[in-house]
Image (cartoon, rainbow, N blue to C red):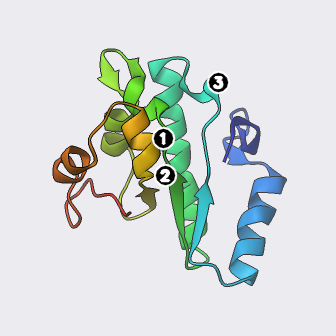
């Protein structure tokens, strides 16, 4: 899921993103996972919060087809901050765990300066803000 997949003027997904989700459903996938997030989605706090809402909308779209939307982290979610808060923390507070899952990449987490056990303890499975490994 990238910036090019969301049309802010129409407040809707691009046809290519809708077809991606449709194809995943046809293949009976359980998840549609975004493998990264481009820089333009995280330049400002407001942009980042907007895209977390788009992630929730991705989750709603996937849920209609019996799937979940997921995001695979990288190091920048732990090393970059907006308004003094780590991107990962903003993300976890903004996404709906019933719609969006986070696939933790321990190597990327470590490279971003985080400690895996601390992250898992901060966002335990079964809590409102949980991670899936």
Residue 95 point in image, percent of width and height? 39, 48
Q: Earlier in the sequence, mark 1 or mark 3?
A: 3
Q: Residue under circle 1?
A: 52
Q: What residue do we see at 42% from left, 22% from top?
A: 80
Q: Which residue is mark 2?
A: 56
Q: Residue at x 44, y 62 (%)?
A: 99
Residue 122, label in figure: none
Residue in the image at 34% along x and 30% along y: 113
Q: CA distance from mark 3 to mark 2?
A: 18 Å
Can you say whether 65 is above or below 128 in the image?
below
Above or below: residue 37 compared with residue 14: above
- From the top left corner, tell me how far across and down residue 63 is, in percent: 53, 71
Label 2 close to label 1 by CB (< 8 Å):
yes
The residue at the point 48 percent across, 45 percent down is 73
Between disc 3 and disc 2, whose residue precedes? 3
Position of 121 with respect to 12 (left or right) is left
Quadrant of the frame with the C terminus:
bottom left
Residue 111's spot in the image, x, y percent? 43, 34
Q: Is residue 31 left or right of residue 28?
A: left
Mark 2 and mark 3 in contact (Cβ < 8 Å)?
A: no
- Asked if 33 appears above or below 53 in the picture, the reply is below
The quadrant holding residue 26 is bottom right
The Cα atoms of the two marked residues, 2 and 1, are separated by 6 Å
The percent position of residue 81, horizontal first and vertical second, equals: 38, 20
Q: Nearer the viewer, mark 1 or mark 3?
A: 3
Neighbourhood count class around disc 2 (C-alpha, 10 Å): few under 14, some 14–19, many 20 upward: many
The numbered disc on residue 40 is 3
Q: CA distance from mark 1 to mark 3?
A: 13 Å
When asked about the image quadrant of residue 4, the answer is top right
């Amino acid at each position: 899921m990238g910036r090019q997949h969301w049309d802010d003027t129409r407040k809707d997904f691009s046809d290519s993103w809708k077809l991606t989700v449709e194809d995943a459903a046809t293949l009976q996938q359980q998840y549609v996972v975004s493998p990264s997030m481009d820089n333009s989605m995280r330049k400002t706090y407001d942009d980042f919060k907007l895209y977390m809402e788009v992630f929730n909308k991705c989750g709603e779209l996937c849920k209609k087809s019996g799937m979940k939307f997921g995001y695979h982290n990288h190091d920048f979610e732990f090393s970059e901050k907006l308004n003094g808060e780590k991107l990962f923390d903003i993300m976890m507070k903004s996404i709906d765990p019933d719609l969006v899952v986070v696939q933790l990449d321990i190597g990327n987490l470590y490279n971003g300066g985080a400690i895996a056990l601390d992250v898992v303890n901060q966002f335990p499975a079964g809590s409102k803000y949980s991670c899936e490994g």
